């Protein structure tokens, strides 16, 4: 059950949910076409773009793809898990197979230790003990994450 800060906020949210954007999820669909289009176009024109430009564009496309996968895990743009899985299956960024990522990420959300250092598999926080024991290089790497 959703909790609201005030009755006014509840009314605003209910009104927003009736908008075409909320009903159709068009931003997520646009993201889908943009990500797959950018990735495909980059590969198609990779010879003309050169190695450095191609690499940089693929990095950006893969980062957006992973963001798109995250939306799919949370039930966007459709409520049909099988269809969302189909949308995410082309391995543009081979970080995790989609099903493995989905199971891990949903387990992360069902954990009472959400964002707890050492307990949440997706957190980038470290405990104060780990931080204190780390050298300057490791602290720099933690900070960069």
Image (cartoon, rainbow, N blue to C red):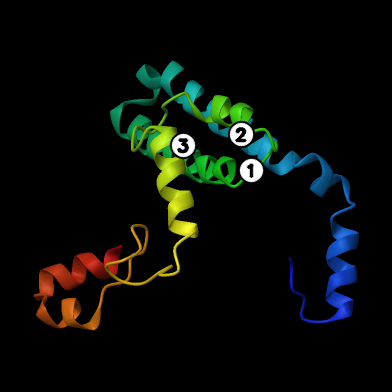
- Front residue (pair 140, 106): 106
66, 115: nearer the viewer: 115
Identify the secondary structure beneath mark 3. Answer: helix
> Would you place residue 63 above or below residue 18 in this image?
above
- In this rendered view, identify the residue nearer to me: 56 or 10: 10
- Answer whether labels 1 and 3 touch (C-beta < 8 Å): no
Q: Earlier in the sequence, mark 2 or mark 1?
A: 1
Residue 71 locus on image (x, y percent):
58, 45
Label of residue 23 in the image: none
Q: Quadrant of the N terminus?
A: bottom right
Q: Quadrant of residue 131?
A: bottom left
Residue at point 75% right, 42% down?
25
Q: Residues within 10 Å of mark 2 (few under 14, many from 20)?
A: some
Asked which secondary structure carries label 1, the reply is loop
Report x, y in % for residue 43.
42, 21
- Residue 24 placement (x, y as % from top left): 80, 39
Residue 61: mark in rendering: 3
User: Contact (CB < 8 A) between labels 2 and 1?
Assistant: yes
Q: Residue at x 40, y 69 (%)?
A: 115
Q: Which residue is mark 2?
A: 81
Q: CA distance from mark 2 to mark 1?
A: 7 Å
Nearer the observer, 52 or 120: 120
Judging by the rendered image, the residue that carries numbered circle 1 is 75
Between the C-alphas of marks 3 and 2, the distance is 23 Å
Q: Residue at image x 28%, y 65%?
A: 144
Looking at the image, residue 33 lies above or below residue 122: above
């Amino acid at each position: 059950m959703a909790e609201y800060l005030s009755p006014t906020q509840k009314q605003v949210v209910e009104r927003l949910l009736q908008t075409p954007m909320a009903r159709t999820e068009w931003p997520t669909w646009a993201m889908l076409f943009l990500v797959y289009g950018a990735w495909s176009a980059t590969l198609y024109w990779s010879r003309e773009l050169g190695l450095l430009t191609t690499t940089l564009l693929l990095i950006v496309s893969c980062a957006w793809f992973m963001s798109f996968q995250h939306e799919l895990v949370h039930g966007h743009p459709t409520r049909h898990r099988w269809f969302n899985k189909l949308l995410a299956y082309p391995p543009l960024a081979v970080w995790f197979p989609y099903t493995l990522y989905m199971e891990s990420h949903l387990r992360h959300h069902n954990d009472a230790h959400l964002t707890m250092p050492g307990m949440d598999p997706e957190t980038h926080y470290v405990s104060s003990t780990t931080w204190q024991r780390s050298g300057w290089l490791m602290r720099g790497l933690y900070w960069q994450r």
